[in-house]
């Protein structure tokens, strides 16, 4: 290692071969097989996606939504946080929050969900994943037929702003049905009423 490498913090350890992508990209099987992946690694378009450390805002926003959804959730559904959704051989994103059918949850050992069992996915926009959250993931979720999608942006006073979308089956894409600040009151996918200003008191 020369002086420049030393200054830049580069060492001479070889690139781990298990992290080198196959010709056609990684698959869902690879995602669950590779030995040293960081927690919350996702698979998008055959590429492994690593998550940056969450901000307090991001974590609290997701906690607020999980709590509100869990309190309102009917017995036929379950709320989950940061669980893999398998959309195809090379697509396995991990939404921040999701709602799944209860019959698809067979105990605490479940580590992935099929798209057909998912009713709602929620992505809270983070700086390291903004394009994926706003553009690519909604495309993938819509193509997989997931009926409801919420995109959460950071608004004034660091309060969450929830953009609610419903799937248009004819378009095969999401249509925005409302933008919610301060209060999230909806009838679908089930009746829910969440005080978004409660993040100030968390």
Image (cartoon, rainbow, N blue to C red):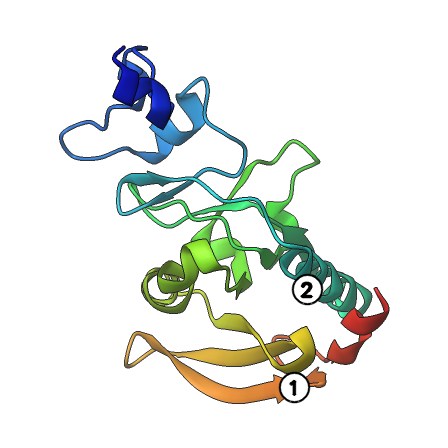
Question: Which residue is depicted at the point 30% across and 34% down?
Answer: 27
Quadrant location of the C terminus in the rendered image: bottom right
Classed neighbour count for the residue bearing mark 2: other residues with Cα under 10 Å, few (<14), some (14–19), many (≥20): many
SS of the residue under disc 2: helix
**Where in the figure is residue 88, as x and y percent of width and height?**
32, 46
**The image quarter in which residue 172 lies:** bottom left
| Residue at the left extreme of this rendering | 23
> In the displayed structure, would residue 74 be above or below residue 112?
below
Please state if 171 lies on the left or on the right of 158 as rendered.
Answer: left
Asked if the residues shown at circle 1 and circle 2 are in contact, with their CB atoms under 8 angstroms apart, the answer is no
Say which label, 1 or 2, has the lower sequence index. 2
From mark 1 to mark 2, how far is it between C-alphas?
A: 13 Å
> In the displayed structure, would residue 30 be above or below residue 175?
above
Quadrant location of the N terminus in the rendered image: top left
Classed neighbour count for the residue bearing mark 1: other residues with Cα under 10 Å, few (<14), some (14–19), many (≥20): some
* Residue that mark 2 sits on: 61
Question: Which residue is depicted at the point 77% across and 62% down?
Answer: 70
SS of the residue under disc 1: strand
Please state if 181 lies on the left or on the right of 7 as rendered.
Answer: right
* Residue that mark 1 sits on: 181
């Amino acid at each position: 290692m020369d002086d420049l490498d030393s200054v830049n913090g580069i060492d001479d350890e070889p690139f781990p071969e298990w992290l080198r992508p196959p010709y056609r990209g990684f698959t869902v099987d690879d995602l669950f097989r590779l030995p040293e992946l960081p927690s919350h690694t996702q698979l998008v378009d055959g590429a492994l996606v690593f998550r940056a450390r969450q901000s307090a805002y991001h974590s609290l926003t997701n906690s607020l939504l999980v709590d509100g959804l869990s309190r309102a959730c009917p017995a036929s559904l379950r709320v989950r946080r940061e669980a893999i959704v398998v959309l195809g051989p090379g697509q396995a994103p991990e939404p921040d929050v999701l709602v799944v059918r209860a019959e698809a949850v067979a105990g605490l050992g479940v580590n992935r969900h099929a798209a057909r069992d998912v009713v709602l996915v929620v992505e809270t926009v983070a700086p390291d994943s903004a394009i994926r959250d706003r553009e690519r993931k909604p495309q993938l979720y819509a193509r997989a037929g997931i009926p409801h999608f919420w995109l959460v942006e950071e608004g004034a006073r660091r309060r969450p702003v929830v953009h609610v979308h419903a799937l248009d089956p004819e378009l095969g894409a999401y249509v925005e049905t409302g933008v919610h600040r301060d209060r999230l009151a909806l009838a679908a996918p089930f009746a829910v009423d969440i005080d978004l200003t409660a993040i100030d008191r968390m």
